[in-house]
Image (cartoon, rainbow, N blue to C red):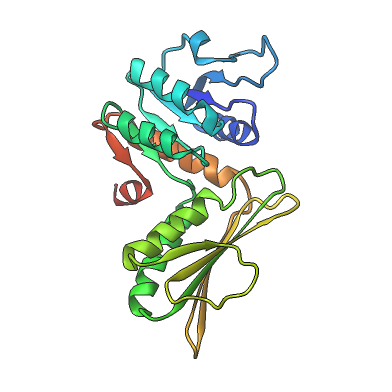
Amino acid sequence: MRIILAGYGGHMGREVRASAERMEDAEIVMGVDPMIPEETPACVRSFAECRAEADVLIDFSHHSMTHELLDFAKRNRLPLVLATTGQTEEEAREIRGAAKEIPLFLAANYSLGIAVLTDLVRKALALYPDAEVEIVEQHHDRKLDAPSGTALSLFAAVKEVRPEARAVTGRSGQGKRQKEDVGIHAIRMGNIVGIHEVIIGTQNETLTLTHQASSRGVFADGSLKAARFLIGKAPGLYDMKDLLRD
């Protein structure tokens, strides 16, 4: 499996490179990273400079590269594993449009544990139709977007069961909680890799579903599994549910 890696020099780029090195049949043939020092071996600073032949493109860069990334993937008919979060509405529309031309894997979190957590949230809310729901996410102090993409994907799972659910990102001032509210709270400190909690409560009991990532390697491993899954697929938008079914 020959891979072009966007975000080559970032934290997650380094994790993907380390995970690929442990695999017998995976190779990073080229990196793309506008922040990398010039003349870094096997890495260029823009897609315009990228000439490598590959089987799949993995992105752990920044959402501002979305247009350039999608254009390159479509032009080269490359399956794309998109692991960057924080996209604008316009960028999200571009992603959906690109999926009509290439196989595109999109997930807010590439941990299999988060996929299990998301499924448990749907099942729990079906059993607790009147329970209140809150989502708490914790990440390192360098993370740019809040709430995290994973927290928003957990909220999307809530909405699958409760279409009337309304996201409330933090609270201040006066006003009681409304029935359809789902609080989403972001904590940023230190070097927390990622902790996500979904709290489901009634007047009589509270159920807390938690996932904690101990290492960023879990996301790198998941992205490589997604890349392998995507090769040979028809154009379309795929996610962790498709990977688990496979």
Q: Is residue 67 above or below residue 49?
A: below
Between residue 51 and residue 203, name the one nearer to us.
203
What x and y, as percent, mark residue 35?
66, 22
What x and y, as percent, mark residue 27?
49, 23
Q: Residue furthest right?
A: 190
Which residue appears at 59% of the width and 25% of the height? Answer: 8
Q: How many numbered badges does the structure rendering display? A: 0
Residue 197 can be seen in this image? no
Q: Residue furthest front?
A: 174
Q: Which image quadrant is residue 107 in? A: top left
What x and y, as percent, mark residue 223?
47, 39
Which residue appears at 65% of the width and 35% of the height? Answer: 11
Q: Is residue 192 left or right of residue 122?
A: right
Residue 114 can be seen in this image? yes
What x and y, as percent, mark residue 202?
47, 85
Q: Is residue 177 above or below residue 28?
A: below
Q: Is residue 217 left or right of residue 240?
A: right
Between residue 195 and residue 63, name the one nearer to us.
63
| On-image quarter of the N terminus | top left
Q: Residue furthest left?
A: 234
Which residue appears at 52% of the width and 33% of the height? Answer: 63
Between residue 202 and residue 183, name the one nearer to us.
183
Q: Is residue 88 left or right of residue 97?
A: right
